[in-house]
Amino acid sequence: MYDDVLVVSATRAEAAHVPAGARLLITGLGKVRSATALARELTAEPDRYRRVINIGTAGALHRRHGGLYLPSRVVEHDISAEALRALGYPVQDVWEIPGGDGSVLATGDTFVNDEAERDRLAARADLVDMEAAALVHVCGEFGVPIRPVKVVSDHADDAAMDWPAAIDAAARDLAAWLADTAFGER
């Protein structure tokens, strides 16, 4: 039914309510696991997908943020890109995503639940997750468009440790977006 769209999620819990018939890839948490799983899938079926949709939760870096976001920019926040570029090694750490809502998503392998870290990241982004930049990078390498879709699950502070309690509501919001927008069923 949706054979040319690949829905990618880090966890089964975040994808618990994905519409039946959708092609779904569960990657595991973090940049390495997500990049490896997606690259493996796109290599195995190089001409199958016309786009990838990355669904999942994100921490809000500003108190005013909540709900569902379609980021316009993804940044990799935990790579020393500036230092590497100064050494002569060009590193891409920012990707523009067409058709977004203007929000900026920072990706890193650190689970952000510290207010000082949140405030540091808030200077350059609205949301934080652990997979999107890696997935965007892989899709760029394979020439497949990607749309990250994130639902705020916490505010990247002490309460972030309650993340598991917020997943089901977020998964329902993500599934509704898929049904309404990506797959146009409702």
Image (cartoon, rainbow, N blue to C red):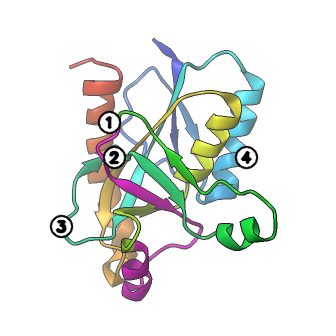
Amino acid type of the residue that numbered disc 3 sits on in the rendered structure: Arg
State how far apart marks 2 and 3 are (Cα). Answer: 21 Å
Amino acid type of the residue that numbered disc 1 sits on in the rendered structure: Ala
Q: Earlier in the sequence, mark 1 or mark 4?
A: 4
Identify the residue under disc 2.
171
Q: Nearer the viewer, mark 3 or mark 1?
A: 3
Identify the residue under disc 1.
175
State how far apart marks 4 and 3 are (Cα). Answer: 34 Å
State how far apart marks 2 and 4 are (Cα). Answer: 23 Å
Residue 97 rendering spot, x and y as whole percentages:
45, 40
State how far apart marks 1 and 2 are (Cα). Answer: 6 Å
Identify the residue under disc 4.
36
Identify the residue under disc 3.
64
Give the magenta range: 100-121
Q: Is residue 171 left or right of residue 5?
A: left
Q: Earlier in the sequence, mark 2 or mark 4?
A: 4
